[in-house]
């Protein structure tokens, strides 16, 4: 291959891919080309996200099949083919639908929650989760409560806290949020699961105790203390 313009760094992975165009072989060559793909997506699309990256990887695989080592460098060929990402990004901006965005955000939340559980040795509070993901508590609530069968109008009808119909709306008050912010992580979880804060499921004393590895009696004691704090502003009784 004396007339080959294929870069030395890509000769081995490209040759291996030619003989193994299976999913495993595709994954290997794409991993090697990742820096080229990332640079092209950022340049032509102006941003990066999982959907754009997935599309770029598919284009790259198609481009590999049309590459001719005697006509140019592999990086140049791939880069030129990925110019279409500018058009793809423009289309995505207009057609991306709520379910797709929520799905991506939900994956981010799930991944971040697992990372925090590994780091903390316990389930993270919503406050800790928002700090990790960058989502607001309102956004966190909307993502958790999203149901594809519901219209987008459901979200515009949610209150500031993002609470669905039937959930006590007193927990969207500034005072409740003030109390929540000042609590320990354990007490924050008790508030989240008792009030259904931020889209959390409302749990019984027994379920809360099991999750926190506490006795139901200990949970009741913590609820009483929290209730006393809430009562300093007005007569709220969600923990009774």
Image (tube, grey):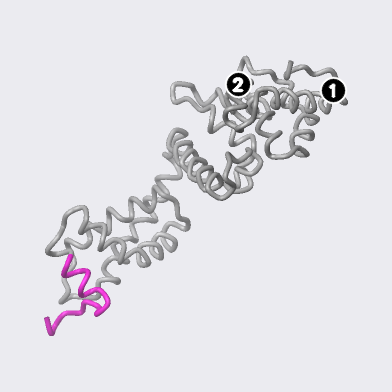
Number of numbered tags placed on the structure image: 2
Residue 12 lies in quadrant: bottom left
Question: Residue 48 location, x and y as percent?
Answer: 45, 55
Quadrant in which the N terminus appears: bottom left
Query: Is 14 placed left or right of 154 in the picture?
Result: left
Camera-side residue of 173 and 46? 173
Q: Let me know if residue 175 is in the magenta part.
A: no
Lower position in the chain sequence, tag 2 or tag 1:
2
Q: What residue would you read off at disc 1?
A: 231
Question: Residue 129 location, x and y as percent?
Answer: 60, 43
Q: Residue at x 63, y 47 (%)?
A: 131
Which range of residues does the magenta coloring cover?
Answer: 1-16
Q: Secondary structure at mark 2?
A: helix
Q: Residue at x 22, y 69 (%)?
A: 13
Q: Residues within 10 Å of mark 2 (few under 14, many from 20)?
A: some
Number of the label disc, if any, that sits on residue 206: 2
Number of the label disc, if any, that sits on residue 75: none
Quadrant in which the C terminus appears: top right
Q: Residues within 10 Å of mark 1 (few under 14, many from 20)?
A: some
Q: Residue at x 49, y 40 (%)?
A: 110
Camera-side residue of 112 and 124? 124
């Amino acid at each position: 291959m004396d007339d080959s313009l294929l870069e030395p760094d890509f000769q081995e992975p490209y040759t291996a891919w030619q003989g193994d165009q299976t999913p495993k072989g595709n994954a290997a060559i794409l991993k090697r080309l990742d820096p080229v793909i990332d640079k092209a997506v950022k340049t032509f699309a102006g941003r990066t996200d999982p959907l754009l990256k997935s599309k770029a990887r598919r284009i790259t695989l198609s481009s590999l099949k049309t590459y001719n080592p005697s006509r140019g460098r592999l990086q140049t060929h791939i880069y030129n083919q990925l110019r279409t990402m500018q058009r793809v990004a423009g289309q995505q901006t207009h057609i991306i639908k709520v379910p797709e965005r929520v799905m991506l955000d939900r994956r981010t939340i799930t991944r971040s929650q697992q990372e925090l559980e590994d780091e903390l040795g316990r389930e993270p509070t919503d406050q800790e989760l928002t700090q990790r993901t960058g989502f607001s508590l309102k956004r966190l609530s909307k993502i958790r409560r999203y149901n594809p069968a519901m219209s987008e109008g459901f979200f515009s009808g949610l209150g500031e806290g993002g609470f669905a119909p039937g959930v006590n709306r007193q927990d969207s008050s500034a005072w409740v949020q003030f109390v929540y912010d000042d609590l320990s992580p354990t007490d924050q979880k008790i508030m989240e699961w008792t009030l259904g804060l931020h889209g959390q499921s409302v749990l019984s004393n027994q379920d809360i105790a099991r999750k926190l590895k506490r006795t139901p009696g200990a949970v009741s004691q913590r609820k009483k203390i929290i209730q006393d704090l809430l009562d300093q502003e007005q007569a709220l009784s969600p923990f009774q």
